Image: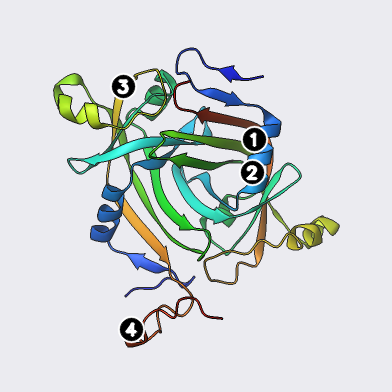
């Protein structure tokens, strides 16, 4: 298992893709009017790319189109102070209707009550991930099992 | 007063509510533009007044400090209820050093305790400029 300088487990691409496929909420980071911007989007991993709706309106679509963007998914456990995150760097593009399987669009999660913007896709050019392990998890003897958090 | 966007049906949160949510959370995501490419990092943070404070080691986040604006995001969504909220802050990010006098001691006393390892001996402070929040509730 590869560990980085902060003691975080380095996740390989396969594990990153598995985690991306298990999530539906991510955050897109992009440059907007020369400033960094970040906002949550519901997404799905479809055909090897991240797909999401621009329910926030056309501004996001215009800013992201053909731009290099960041996309992040994470899961944090506030009790155990563990978690993982996956970061994607890729180019965003707007999907045209011909590329959309109507069934897929139906299943793209959309939480905002109204508004139905374009469907965007982000290519998975760079994918990296980290996992915060529980203290001692990397050295624990699996035969000992979980001590159930005994003091 | 609730402010509902007529086009999307999303409620806008006012600044006080955004600050209250920032004060209650402990993990958020920092977005910076580094060499022209946007990057996002999950971080442990504390809110101090109207600033996001966190610790880091030398790297992209520290490189970006003092060179412009960073964005910061927190959210909480309930998949089953299809409800949730998000808050996005934008502001100048700088490293707090001994040159800042008592401010360094103040941020060090905040108790920012990163879950990840590493020394994280550098303290960064994102002074919140613009702040926006959104909430989606079922059947709004």
Q: Locate residue A63, reporting x and y percent.
A: 42, 26
**What secondary structure is marked by label 4?**
helix
Mark number for residue B18?
Answer: 1
- Image check: A4 left or right of B104? left
Could you give the CA–CA distance between mark 1 and mark 2, rounded to whole angstroms?
6 Å
Tell me the residue that label 3 is attached to.
A118
Could you give the CA–CA distance between mark 2 and mark 4, rounded to whole angstroms?
38 Å
Residue lying farthest to the right in this orientation: B102
Mark in the foreground, 3 or 2: 2
Q: Are marks 4 and 1 in contact (CB under 8 Å)?
A: no
Quarter of the image for residue B132 reads top right
Respond whether the residues carrying marks 2 and 4 are from the same subunit.
Answer: no
Tell me the residue that label 4 is attached to.
A142
Q: Quadrant of the N terminus of chain A?
A: bottom left
Q: Residues within 10 Å of mark 1 (few under 14, many from 20)?
A: many
Label 4 marks which chain's residue?
Answer: A
Could you give the CA–CA distance between mark 4 and mark 1, rounded to whole angstroms?
44 Å
- Note whether A23 is above or below A138 in the view shown: above
**What secondary structure is marked by label 1?**
helix
Could you give the CA–CA distance between mark 3 and mark 1, rounded to whole angstroms?
28 Å
């Amino acid at each position: 298992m590869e560990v980085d300088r902060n003691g975080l487990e380095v996740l390989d691409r396969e594990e990153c893709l598995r985690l991306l496929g298990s999530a539906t909420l991510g955050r897109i980071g992009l440059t907007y009017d020369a400033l960094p911007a970040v906002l949550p989007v519901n997404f799905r991993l479809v055909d090897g790319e991240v797909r999401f709706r621009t329910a926030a309106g056309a501004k996001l679509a215009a800013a992201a189109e053909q731009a290099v963007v960041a996309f992040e998914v994470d899961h944090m456990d506030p009790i155990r102070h563990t978690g993982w995150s996956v970061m994607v760097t890729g180019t965003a593009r707007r999907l045209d209707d011909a590329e959309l399987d109507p069934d897929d669009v139906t299943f793209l999660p959309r939480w905002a009550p109204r508004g139905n913007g374009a469907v965007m896709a982000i290519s998975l050019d760079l994918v990296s991930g980290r996992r915060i392990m529980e203290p001692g998890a990397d050295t624990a003897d699996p035969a000992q099992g979980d001590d159930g958090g005994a003091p | 007063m609730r402010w509902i966007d007529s086009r999307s049906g999303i409620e806008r949160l006012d600044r006080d509510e955004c600050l209250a949510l920032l004060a209650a959370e402990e993990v958020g995501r920092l977005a910076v533009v580094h060499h022209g490419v946007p990057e996002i990092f999950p971080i442990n943070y504390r809110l101090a007044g109207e600033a996001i404070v966190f610790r880091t080691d030398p790297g992209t986040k520290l490189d970006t400090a003092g060179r412009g604006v960073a964005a910061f995001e927190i959210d909480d969504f309930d998949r089953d209820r299809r409800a949730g909220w998000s808050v996005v802050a934008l502001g100048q990010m700088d490293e707090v050093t001994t040159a800042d006098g008592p401010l360094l001691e103040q941020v060090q006393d905040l108790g920012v305790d990163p879950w990840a390892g590493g020394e994280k001996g550098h303290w960064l402070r994102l002074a919140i400029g613009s702040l926006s929040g959104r909430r989606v509730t079922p059947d709004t």
